[in-house]
Image: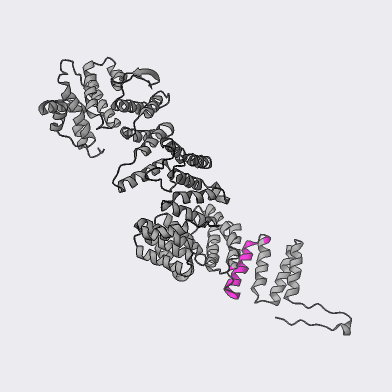
Amino acid sequence: MKKNKKVSGEQHGITLLQLDANLFYERAIRSLDRFHYDKALKYFQKAVDYEPNNPINYCNMAGVLSEIGKYGESNHILQKVINEIDPDMTECHFYMANNFANMEYFEEAERELLHYLQEDEEGHFLEEAEEMIELLQYELERPTPLTKVKARAGVYEHIRAREMLEEGKFLEAIRLLETITEETPDFLAAHNNLALAYYYVGMTNDAKQAIEAVLKQDPANLHALCNLAIFYHYEGSQDKLKPLVAMLTKLDPFYQEHLFKLATTMGIVKEHAAALRHFQRLTKQGEAKKDPCISHFAAVAACNIGKLELAEKFWLMTRSMDEQSQLPQFFLILLKQMKPGLPLQPSLSYSYFSTVEEQVEAWEQQARERGEQLESIFKRAYLFWAFQYSDREAKLKAINDLDVCYDAAVEDMLKQYLLKQDEDDYVKRLVMYALRSMGMEDAFDVMLGGKLMQVDAQRVPTLESSSNLADCDPLWERVAELSLAHTARRYNAIWQHDMITLWINYLSKGYVSTSKLTKLEAWAAALEYLTAKLYNKPITYHEAAVRYGTSITTISKRVKEIDAVLGIKSKLKAPWYKR
């Protein structure tokens, strides 16, 4: 630094200014306040001249250049700081990222931003950097490949590890969490999630050791205590679980994160009343009260202890907050199938699936794990939901389970469905077969092909509505009736419909005279035999002969006659055929 000459005022009557970097810095700031950028730049340059090894002066110059749009010159100075003056001044990378972004050099901006986040220990610009990440992701149309944020000492990596757990990438999460806990042993949240990850892959001893490591540092750590309760619950260690649950039920956490953890834990260990109390608190607090998942969980807890009116209130809240989801409407229908004051058995799980189908599939999986069939109340709710709110595929699935949930209310709902103008005729025919197979005897109205008609439950509506067979022979119908009667309760409505469709196709393509239509039982048995083969359902000629009271030889002849017209057996052998 140059020495400034100072002349005595006694000698000349004036005192010269002390020319140094501070003087020019102050003048530069005053110029900036007046938006005199050219003067500010000159003063900052003078400050650099007096203190050429002070990186702050260079950064000030770079800041003014950026302000007047000279982003390239600004970056040139910032790069000089990093390369020649102070390599540890990592905020220069953030400044350079801003300049590149302003020049729309987004790849370069991303490079410098990542360098800043991964190397800067102070993190003064973390919020601004996160905002810039959002911009870069939008402009580059891909996620930013950020692996760590040094200023957060494992926090960012921990967030990524939690995402891996949610995605089911347990082994990857374990590797990352082990690294975090080794580098920052006092990061208790990482230890807790490592315990969960170990547990998910069956490493129960390691999971408990991870929890013990947390409780050794913080005996009152709520997340660790809740995780331990969950482990005991799934292990069936009731002697260890009971005192722990007794202690946890007395807690009323202040922070939302702790309250949510305790609420979900109480739900998992079947303490639904405690879970409801905590979820109700969450529905009244901050951001949580806007979250449809929270009100759904509150409804589940209320439903599990038989408080159906309260459950309805929370599912109505969920529906208003998540208008795109069909789950709330499905659960509102489920409530109507329940008896007031009686909780569901088994209890509902605390999950919020994307679709009704995913929810039902989860229930079916749980039932299979118990070695049981899905409870009829769930199938009944699905039936009502499918026919009132869902698509063709959902209706077809629901019809398959009609036999386990059929009653007068279901019958009335299906009759109303048959009268709807814009619904699928194919599904309506399946519904008619289903009603018949359930033993319905009364005639009913149906809208088919845009026409209202009355159908006798004892007659076959497909034969009646076939344009090719408008004047169908009573014997033809008798064959169809025999096959339907013998397959009732053993075939679902779709299979029965396809069986009658097979009969209609045969009658339409191959002329069958009344004189030839003898031994009707054998024709009906042949229809069932071929339909069973189409659906890969085991059947023998002997079984069919016993069931229909006819001979194996006669059934075999009728099967050959039908197959000669329709070519069913060759279809079954085709490599593309699959049921």
x, y percent for residue 214? 45, 67
x, y percent for residue 295? 50, 45
Depth check: give the residue in front, 117 or 454.
454
Depth check: give the residue in front, 421 or 185.
185
Depth check: give the residue in front, 389 or 465.
389
x, y percent for residue 59? 65, 69
Q: Residue at x 35, y 29 (%)?
A: 407
Q: Residue furthest bottom?
A: 11
471 sits left or right of 547 in the view: right
Image quadrant where residue 70 sits = bottom right
Marks counted in the figure total: 0
Above or below residue 529? Residue 318 is below
Image quadrant where residue 194 sits = bottom left
The quarter of the image holding the N terminus is: bottom right
Q: Residue at x 14, y 32 (%)?
A: 541
Main secondary structure of the magenta stretch? helix
Q: Residue at x 30, y 20 (%)?
A: 466
325 sits left or right of 574 in the view: right
Above or below residue 228? Residue 476 is above
The magenta segment is: 67-90
Above or below residue 300? Residue 520 is above
Above or below residue 376? Residue 457 is above
